[in-house]
Amino acid sequence: MGKGTQAERLEKNFGWVHVSTGDMLRDAMQEGTYLGQKVKKYVERGDLVPDDLMVEMVRDRLSKEDCKKGFILDGFPRTVIQAEKLDGIFDELELKLDGVISIEVSEEEIVRRLSERLICAGCGRVVTTGGNVEKDERCSVCGDQLVRRKDDKPETIRYRLKVYEKQTRPLILYYAGRKLLRKVDGVGLEDEIYCRILSALGFSPGKG
Ligand code: AMP
């Protein structure tokens, strides 16, 4: 929760490439590519996209030149199979995983925050409405319409949480066992959470 915003800040301050699998899938869906058409049904109902598609997408992205300067994976891996395949990709590309951040937020808080979130249909900016959603509200940056993500409907949010419990939570043990896991309290202001992430990564909070 809030992982995209925090990853963007890390990208801006450290120059690491923000690799968000959710953004990549939404772009493919919007552009109507072959991949986009294939994944639409999974994303919109809140299911995970099959591992083989995800792993190929991530392998392609991490092979690109810009990732040599360092990158943050946002939303990947989400299953133990993806994590095992990611280990293989890191070996293949001679990369090293420095750490895994788990931003910890209660279920009620996740449902509340996601229900209040809109995104700009034009530039993809995330806007928190505080619950007051005006009809036909516009983005203050590009002027395009603010919309709700199809998978941010309350019933889909609850379904995504179930999917998380079953398929993604086991990764906590997977990375804790490898001494890579850093848990961060995700309750508080964006700046506070950012400072906690910096400390968890071993940087002084003065950075960025
Ligand atoms: P996110 O923007 O990270 O919340 O991802 C939005 C949706 O994209 C998820 O609910 C999944 O349907 C899909 N997705 C993103 N990353 C993955 C992944 N690593 N594995 C499978 N599906 C994913």
Image: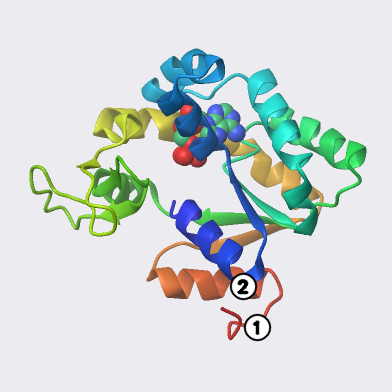
In-image side of 129 versus 67 (left or right) = left
Q: State the residue at coordinates (52%, 25%).
A: 48
Looking at the image, is 194 positioned above or below residue 170?
A: below
In-image side of 208 versus 81 (left or right) = left
Q: State the residue at coordinates (71%, 74%).
A: 202
- The image quarter containing residue 191 is bottom left
- The image quarter containing residue 192 is bottom left
The amino acid pointed to by label 1 is: Ser
In the rendered image, which quarter contains the C terminus?
bottom right
Near mark 2 (Cα within 10 A), the count class, few <14, some 14-19 or many ≥20, is some
Residue projecting furthest to the front: 142
List the residue tagged with mark 1. 204
Image x and y of residue 104, in percent: 50, 56
**Residue 46 can be seen, yes or no:** no
Mark positioned earlier in the residue sequence (2 or 1): 2
List the residue tagged with mark 2. 198
Near mark 1 (Cα within 10 A), the count class, few <14, some 14-19 or many ≥20, is few
